[in-house]
């Protein structure tokens, strides 16, 4: 079993982000672990097939990343001052990127939220949390927003 010296908190700046931060902080204090908060910006590849000019796609992707980095800085200041924590904004397919970053960091635990989608919504949108839980080689704590 891998020691929990590093926790990866994967989040999407949704309404449940504050609740996830509380859980991550609790686990970090309990295990005296470092936290890395990860936001994965979605890829824009699929829009190239819609005859959108690539420079427009690149510009939009850049704006999304800039905005996410600003939001991450504010989130980190609000929730993780005084403990070992850093924020990371990546670009890619969320389930794969979460697992990749967890492996690179040698994280011992992933914490992430679920949206609680069911039925047709779940079929249409899939579940990032479900994919991570199924593919992760380390424990994953999922938190359903209250």
Image (cartoon, rainbow, N blue to C red):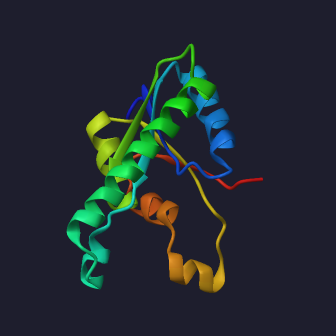
> What x and y, as percent, mark residue 23?
64, 36
Residue lying at the far top in this picture: please name it: 82
Query: Compared with residue 128, is residue 77 higher up or lower down, i.e. above or below?
Result: above
**Along the line of sight, which residue is nearer the eye, 27 or 98?**
98
Q: Is residue 28 visible?
A: yes
Q: Is residue 20 above or below residue 42?
A: above
Q: How many marks?
A: 0
Q: At 47% from the left edge and 36% from the top edge, which residue is drawn? A: 70
Q: Which residue is more in the foreground, 39 or 115?
A: 39
Tell me where residue 61 appears, x and y as whole percent. 33, 57
What is the residue that sits farthest to the right in this orientation? 146
Residue drawn where x is 61% and y is 59% of the image: 114
Q: Can residue 137 be seen by looking at this rendering? A: no
Q: Residue at x 41, y 46 (%)?
A: 138
User: Would residue 60 be found to the left or right of residue 111 on screen?
Assistant: left
Q: In this rendering, would 58 be left or right of 72? A: left
Which of the pair 64/144 is nearer the observer?
64
With 140 as the anchor, is 49 left or right in this view?
left
Residue at left offset 28%, top offset 77%: 52
Left or right, residue 56 beside residue 139? left
39 shown above or below 27? below
């Amino acid at each position: 079993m891998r020691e929990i010296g590093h926790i990866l908190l994967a989040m999407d700046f949704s309404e449940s982000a504050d609740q996830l931060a509380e859980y991550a902080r609790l686990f970090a204090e309990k295990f005296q672990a470092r936290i890395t908060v990860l936001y994965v910006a979605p890829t824009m590849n699929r829009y190239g097939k819609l005859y959108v000019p690539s420079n427009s796609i690149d510009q939009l992707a850049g704006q999304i990343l800039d905005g996410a980095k600003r939001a991450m800085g504010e989130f980190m200041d609000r929730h993780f001052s005084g403990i070992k924590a850093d924020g990371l904004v990546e670009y890619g397919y969320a389930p794969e990127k979460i697992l990749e970053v967890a492996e690179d960091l040698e994280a011992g635990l992933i914490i992430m939220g679920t949206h609680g989608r069911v039925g047709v919504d779940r079929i249409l949108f899939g579940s990032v949390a479900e994919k991570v839980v199924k593919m992760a080689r380390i424990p994953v704590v999922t938190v359903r927003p209250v």
